[in-house]
Each structure stands twice: as structure tokens, then as C-alpha cells.
Image (tube, grey):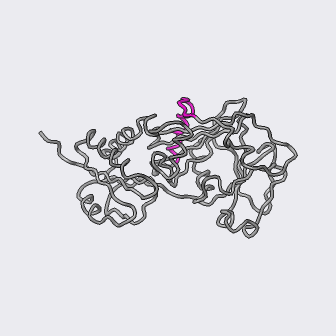
Amino acid sequence: MASVTEKNLVLVHSNRWQDRADFEIVKTHVESLAPDIAVFIASNDIPSSITRKRAASRPTLIFSPIRLLSFKPARGKLYAGTPMSKIDEMHRLAAAGLPIPAFEVIGPNTRLAADDYGPFVLVKPSHSFASFGQGIELCRTSTLRYRAPAEFPEWHPGRQAPMFAQKFIDCGYPMSCRVLTIFGEPIFTYCRQSTKPLKLNPHKDVFEQHEYLPAPPDRITFTTREPDLLQLAADAYRAMPEVALQACDIVREKGTGRLYLLEVNPGGGTWMFSSESCGSYKQSLGISDLAAEFDAFRTIARMLVERTRADAE
């Protein structure tokens, strides 16, 4: 007997941010796993009114890596990227009990104690659309001072929102690791670590990014299956359960081995498999299929089936 369709799943595709072919693959996997779920792919760049009308016929779940733009569903439980202030993001991660470095909004009277922050702090923009390291600086804790928005260059995100200080975690080597998750399930990892030890001049006030972040040509790139690192990324989901796709940036402290979660990029512009920056990841890792490591598209389909059956409305 043919299975009766009971729920709808809408995958919302956004040009430039994802390749529609990826969503077609996910759709095929969902249909194979769950004959009871009808799958639609809507464009986020137009109203998609026909899809909107068809999807409204039964309980629906909507998944979009980034926030909804032109597409406005008539009904359904929504899981979508949510741009937010980095300060709000840090507060939510802290409230969930996740291990994040100490942080503080930089105001006119801000003076940080080395006992709390160590010798160096990162200065970061809190603007929700700041990305790719834009506006980030490393400085000595003792020299950190407030800068009024007008003091920043025209392009600087510090003109748009407050800057904040975040304790710098000494990893021994310049390093960073990203774990991409869907509902807390890992679907991609990307780690970078310099081949040279971290050596910061204690008398220097401000550092260039290449002095504390891994940068070509002196770096190695790799994927990871370290259980504690993957577990921290999975745990991060509980802080923002409405954001299905999270790109968790994590570092490991030298000596203690303790992990720190830096951010989860809730805006969702992190679909690594076919975004505009995926070519650089393929080249760095020497991998042509970025979805293969965790069988990402099948994993995404499985998680969406579970959520659709549980949450569609």
C-alpha cells in the first residue's frame, strides 16, 4: 500500500549562498527515507507563491540556512539563520553554560584586568553582519582603550555597532577549527594550524592578523574527528535551537587542552559545500567533495525527516 503524505518540508534556497543542486540531493534523500513527507524547494529570492500555496496544505517545516527574504511561508515551523549582535550571541552561549572566553563591551570607562583576561585580548565588532575577520584586532590588555565610532575608518564595522573585547586563548600555535552542524549533528569540519609556534612580542601594542591567525603559506589544513571538539559543537545547538545550521568556531588552549567556543555564526551564510568560498576549502583540504566526510547531504536529510515528523505545524 502506498504511504500517505502527512507532512511537508520546504527547503529554501538562496542564490549565491547555496547551489540548488545540493538541495535537490537532500530532497531525493528525504523522499527515499520518508515517503510520508512531501518536499518542496522554494527560492528565497522571489515570493515562490505557487510553492507557498502548495506547502500550506498540511503541517509543514521550513528550513533555510539564512534568514527568509522574499519567500514568506503561509504556515509551518521555521528553522532559519538569524543574524544577531555578537554580544547577544555571546550572552546566549554563556546562558547555555558553554565554555566561551571572557568578553565585555568596550565603553569609555572600560579597563580590563590581566588577571581575568591575560596579557592579550581580541577586539571584535559586534555588528551582526561583520564577517571574514573584518575589524578584528589583537592588542595588549593593558593598552586597550575605547574608540568612538567616528574614529574608525569608513568601512569599519565599529561604525555600525559597539566593539567588544574577548580573552585571547593561547593555543601554542595560531589555529582555528570550524565544525558545521545541522541541529547539532556534525556535517563538515575544517581546521587550520600554523606550523610555527605562536610568539607574540609582549611589548607590542597591536598585532597584525597573520601574527596570531594561521595564514598562508605557513599553515596546515585538516579535518577532525576529535570527539570532545565534535561534542562541543553539538552542545552549542542548545543555545540557539531555532537556528538549524551553525558554524562553530572552536580553539584548544595550550597546556590545559581546554576547548573554547568563539562563535556559532547564526546568520547561516556558512553552507560550506557550495558557497562562494567553497573553492578555497576544496583547495586547502585537497578534497573535491566537501560533503563526503560526514555524508553531509544524507545526514541533513535524516535530521530534517526527524524534525519534520516532530515539529511540522
Measured as percent of width and height from the top left, residue 308 is found at 32, 47
For the view shown, which residue lies furthest in the left direction?
A: 1
Seen at 75% across and 48% down, the residue is 121
Quarter of the N terminus within the rendering: top left
Is residue 230 in the magenta section?
yes
Seen at 69% across and 38% down, the residue is 218
Is residue 151 in the magenta section?
no
For the view shown, which residue lies furthest in the right direction?
A: 203
Seen at 28% across and 50% down, the residue is 39
Q: Is residue 224 above or below residue 87?
A: above
Left or right, 76 with respect to 152, comes to left
> What is the span of residues highlighted in magenta in the rendered image?
222-239
**What is the number of callouts on the image?**
0
Residue 196 figure quarter: top right
Quarter of the C terminus within the rendering: bottom left
Measured as percent of width and height from the top left, residue 128 is found at 58, 59
Q: Nearer the viewer, residue 23 or 166?
A: 23
Q: Nearer the viewer, residue 272 or 166?
A: 272
Q: Is residue 247 above or below residue 295?
A: below
Q: Is residue 279 above or below residue 87?
A: above
Left or right, 103 with respect to 31, comes to right
Measured as percent of width and height from the top left, residue 85 is found at 59, 58
Q: Nearer the viewer, residue 36 or 112?
A: 36
Measured as percent of width and height from the top left, residue 73 is found at 34, 62
Residue 26 figure quarter: top left
For the view shown, which residue lies furthest in the bottom direction?
A: 150
Q: Main secondary structure of the magenta part?
A: helix
